[in-house]
Image (cartoon, grey):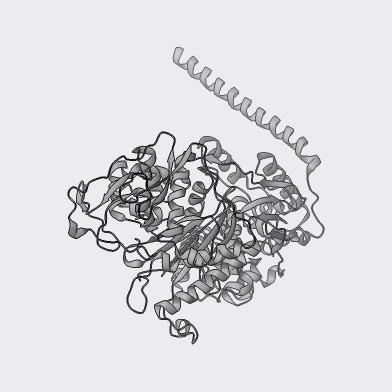
Amino acid sequence: MTSAMALIRMVRAAFYGTLAVISAAVLIGVGMFFVAVPDLPRVPEPLSRIIETPPTEIFAATGERLMVMGGREVIPLSEVSTYFIQAILATEDHRFWEHHGVDKLRTIKAVWVTLLKPGRIEGASTITQQLSKNLFFSFKRSYMRKFRELLVAIQIESRYSKQEILEAYLNQITMGVGASGIEQAARTFFGKPASELTLAQSALLAGLPKSPTRYNPYLHLDRAKERQRVVLSRMEAVGYITHDQALSAFREELTFQPPSKASRTGSYFLDLVIKNLEERYGPEVVYHGGLKVTTTIDPQLQSMAEESMRDGLQRLDRIVGIDEVSGRGIVSGVTRPQGALVAVEANSGSVKAMVGGRSYVETEFNRAIENNRLPGSSFKPFLYYTAFEKSGLHPATVLVDRPVTIPVKGAPDWEPENFVLRHEGPMILKQALIKSVNSIAAQLVERTGPKDVIDAARRCGITSELEPVYSIALGTSGVSPLEMASAFACFANGGIRHEPFWIWRVEDALGRVLEEHIISGERGLDPSIAYQVLDLMRGVVDEGTGSVIRRMGFNLPAAGKTGTTDGYYDAWFTGFTPTLCASVWVGYDRGEGLRDTNGTGITGGRAAAPIWADFMRKATEGDPPREFKIRPDIQFKLVDPMTGVEATSSTLHPIRVALREGQELQEHTVGEEGFTGSEAGAMPSDDLLEF
């Protein structure tokens, strides 16, 4: 009896609890209704006006309009392939013909998943709700906005037929590469009207609205095909097609139209901006939300960067033996070297110029951000910073350039070689970086450990995956030119790191600010140690592996580092003035090293540094010389490059080093124990000798 009474009490409690929840939900719903109704937009008459949206405009930092996106080609529902109608309904809203603007089952499921499974958000918008979004000029996601969309969807359903709603929807969906609406999409991708689309073509197009960039078949055919498979499965599950039809359509080989010029932005930078906007706001808002987007690009600097890259690669074509004049590199299919350049403002992180390849028309692949390549010795500044910070060394510390063997647990010993395959003996660390001596870099990473070097790179802004191995000292993990430019800017900016960005401001169609970038740097490096490394890199430009920059006539204060990977697969130069930092990469896209007609490898000093110098000379023309800010605790000393002792009047070729407060020079010459005379020798100092 007691158990029965307890059970009754439990049932009663559950009933009243459920009733309370339902009552609360009803009260919340009623409250939201009265709050939402006064601000509801008016449903247009006729419904086709709902897709008449203002174009999105993209501007340069200078105010110049770079691009306008928008416009649709409207067709009646009767001119759309039945296959496509079925594909889009099965994928987006398979109960479209039954509901009245709101799919109750999907809504309940979405609420259940969202509330009970933290971190996961379930979508439940019907086609009518998606159409209603066009009436809202704020793109901030909120529960109240979703509730208003729901109310507008109910209004639309009460005033218009299902056919009118579906027709408006099919004429406004965004398919990517500039195609909006099913008619534009059919002609853009397959060169035919929407009425002639096959089942296979319809299924592929119906999968694009979910993410036009991710499933772009021109760039990601494998993803587009996988999405097509999902659409065909949905069509089969709903009963529109049989399993055999789905299988046959999936196996059908699709032939795409070559991407038209109208579908391209013509710019690696604009591609990046649009992709970023799509990720934040969705493609429908980006292409038809009337956004006004102000970017960071400087059109004049961009034009200079493109010109310098074009001229530099044509020069490189001649060096490697490709006859550019006759067009042999294009006509005969000879693979030509590619390049990338990124320039960022040192004190803000704003991207001022970006070149992602030899020609956007030939390839839209953006090597400035999507092509992680090994940086070689251009990674050494992070190593030297770590050695100064963690091991108590300084630019005048003497190490011996000698053969080095570092035991590696579970792997062969690491025995790095110098670029010229010989050793020079004792030298100060500034001289070691100027000449890019690998054996000394190996000794430094053995002292610090690779993890601390990676930590320094991370603090400067390197985000790519870096392997914690000793060879990280010689740049054996891939990075992008954008990362290198922004990371070196940390040295130019006194150790303050700024995340690179390319969008200053976004406004909606009514002029309301959706986002605005506020410059805020973060302390990444000790400012005095950062200056010491900067001073080392000034030596690279003035008299080391990057001295070609001075020979080309660029005379403003500058610092930087060359890089060349084993096999000459990658050639780099990343450098900066006090205001502008630029990174240049040159190489073949895959499987081939840079070599001239004599078979000699082409280094960063020979391939990338001239492009950098040409661009920076143009970019800073007319600028007054600006010196790097010197920290108050920095003092300069002239020292002997071999012994590290203070220079005298008889010292040959003394080098100026930057020392922090409390750091002292050596008082006597370091011996060469264990260093044989046969290994010593004058190491040539021209710009080719670096790794």
Q: Nearer the viewer, residue 558 or 673?
A: 673
The answer to whether 400 appears left or right of 550 in the picture is left
Corner quadrant of residue 140: top right
Quadrant location of the C terminus in the rendered image: bottom left
Q: Is residue 241 visible?
A: no
Q: Which residue extends farthest front? A: 649
The answer to whether 592 appears left or right of 408 in the picture is right
Corner quadrant of residue 92: bottom right
Q: Relative to residue 135, is residue 164 depicted above or below?
A: below
Residue 114 percent coordinates (x, y): 55, 39
Residue 610 percent coordinates (x, y): 48, 67
The answer to whether 583 appears left or right of 164 in the picture is left
Residue 418 percent coordinates (x, y): 28, 59
Q: Nearer the viewer, residue 300 or 192?
A: 300
Q: Nearer the viewer, residue 325 or 148?
A: 325
Quadrant location of the N terminus in the rendered image: top left
**Residue shown at 61%/59% (left/top)?**
274
Q: Nearer the viewer, residue 415 or 187?
A: 415
Corner quadrant of residue 306: bottom right
Q: Relative to residue 153, is residue 2 depicted above or below?
A: above
